């Protein structure tokens, strides 16, 4: 399994920032000529400033891809 790791630097709206990054990543993947369905299954892991971590598939973070 492939993992994409993103560390959030903002305390508020941590999940919303992860959603934005996921949308941008899928869009860039699509624009480079690749199939976004494959990329959408990759898990993105992010960490809050408090040290909590979360992981979700990119496609679930950006359901409107």
Image (cartoon, rainbow, N blue to C red):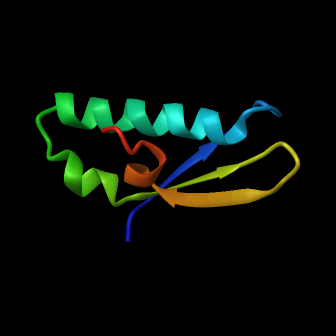
Extreme-right residue of the structure: 50
| Number of marks present in the image shown | 0
Q: Quadrant of residue 42?
A: bottom left
Query: Whole-percent x and y of residue 1?
Result: 38, 71
42 left or right of 10? left
Q: Residue 20's x, y, as percent? A: 51, 31
Left or right, residue 16 beside residue 35: right
Q: Residue furthest left?
A: 33
Q: Residue at x 80, y 57 (%)?
A: 52
In the rendering, at what x and y percent does residue 18 appear?
Answer: 58, 40
Q: Is residue 55 above or below residue 1?
A: above
Which residue sits at x=45%, y=40%? 22
Front-most of 42 and 5? 42
For the C terminus, the quadrant is top left
Direction front: furthest residue: 64
Snapshot quadrant of residue 64: top left
Instruction: Specify whether 40 is left or right of 18.
Output: left
Residue nearest the observer in this picture, 41 or 32? 41
Residue 62 coordinates in the image, percent (x, y): 42, 42
Q: Residue at x 65, y 42 (%)?
A: 15
């Amino acid at each position: 399994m492939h993992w994409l790791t993103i560390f959030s630097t903002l305390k508020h709206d941590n999940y919303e920032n992860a959603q934005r990054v996921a949308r941008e990543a899928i869009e860039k993947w699509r624009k480079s000529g690749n199939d976004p369905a494959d990329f959408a299954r990759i898990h993105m892991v992010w960490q809050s400033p408090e040290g909590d971590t979360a992981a979700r598939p990119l496609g679930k973070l950006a359901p409107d891809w």
